Amino acid sequence: MKTITKIATLALCACLGALSFAACDGGEAKEVIVWGGAEDQTLLKQIVKEFKEANPDVTETITVRVQDAWDAQSVVAKDPEAAADVILIPHDQVGIMAQAGLLAEIRDGTAATFATDIKTNNDPATVQQATYNGKLYGFPLTMDTYIEYYTTNIFPESLEDTLLGSVDAMLAANMPSIGTSAEKAAAFGFNIGDGFYFNMGFFAMDCTLFGADGTDINACNWDNADGLKFMQYAAKNFRQKGKKFKSDDAKNLATAVLNNRLGACISGGWEMQDTFKNASNIKYRTLPSIEIDGQERPLVAFSNSKQYVVNNMSENKGVASRLAAYITSEQNQLRYAADRGYYPSNTNAQNNTAVKDDPFFKVIREQLDKSVPVPIIPEISRYWEAAKAVGSSIYNGSLADDDASLQAALDKFIDDLHSAI
């Protein structure tokens, strides 16, 4: 999002002398910058090229740059004027950025129906996730959640509905050695120190974060009796010293499953096109259950959507909005599905046979239907560090496993959520 001085033109004019310089336009060319993830660059650049070809009236230069969506909000907040015009973010950053005045509201115009098209063409959940205080801010692109991946070299596919459907059964299984070494493979893992995954057990116990619909900043009941039961379960089963459970970055866990050092892990749908692409030993299913009080309780995933938003400081909001709409169109969402394994938010794309009949997308859809969307309210920003602190202390053993210590950790977690309210 900047103006590019025509340096080459001015330099040439200077060389030709004052007379020739008078004939130079000395003008400035407008640049529209769009951000996308490193893995998406090839596809995104091709889409931008096609946008320019389809819209010859757009004279601005469009530049694609790498920016991880998860960090976009903090990068924009530091210097909005230096940030891109078109920005990819997870939906839980919409509220934070909108409240700070960083996002342009998306409306219908005289020559475009941006808002109407978004509301008409996308999954209602993603439209809600694009909306803050009744105003629309995002162009939905994908719907994301996480599932269980496993290697058939350790856990045969025939055990999917029994052993692989139960965390307790996996942790009780006899594990093979890694290669020719004496070290045993771990059984199951997820990043318990990441709030995106730490929620699973609490939601399995019917606890809520910011209320049933995720909008009440004073409503989080993870410190109740059911939340304590999950903490007891986690302290017993999700310790590093136990060897069979593994917590690490989701990408590292996926690599361990691929290399038969870990039987199963939980990670996002995107993993299939990255770590697991073309891997013959990798299968997938919806999340397993945990057994508490003699009852099997399926783990419940967080879900989110990725959205393209327009920088409120952009000098080219019109072109930026047209570009965001083009990138997130039905046609291009199908390309993201095929090339990157992203489940589309566009309902027509969801019903396209390439998505609807795909075995992997069927599992993603099934898990999405059982998931809880990450709350959109700005106060969600307090959750991540608070969850990390509790989850990490369980895994590394710094949190004692007696009920008083576990309850105290939950009480502090709630206090941390409310600390700035």
Image: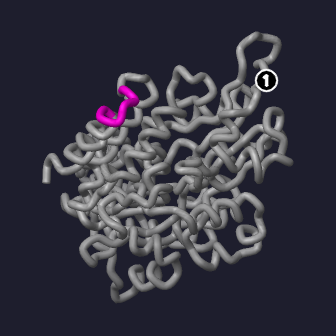
Q: In this picture, is 127 found above or below 411?
A: below
Q: In this picture, is 306 found above or below 412?
A: below
Residue drawn at the location 18% of the way across and 50% of the way down:
418
Q: Few, some or many C-alpha atoms within 10 Å of disc 1 (few <14, some 14-19, many ≥20)?
A: some
Q: Closer to the camera, 335 or 360? A: 360
Q: Closer to the camera, 87 or 173? A: 173
Q: In this picture, is 118 found above or below 263?
A: below
**Residue at label 1?**
176
Q: In this picture, is 57 found above or below 14?
A: below
Which of the 4 quarters of the picture holds residue 96? bottom left
Q: In what quadrant of the picture does the C terminus appear?
A: bottom left
At label 1, the amino acid type is: Pro
Left or right? Give the position of 153 relative to 264.
Answer: right
Is residue 305 part of the magenta span, yes or no?
no
Boundaries of the magenta span: 400-405
- Residue 16 % position (x, y): 32, 40
Q: Closer to the camera, 420 or 92? A: 420
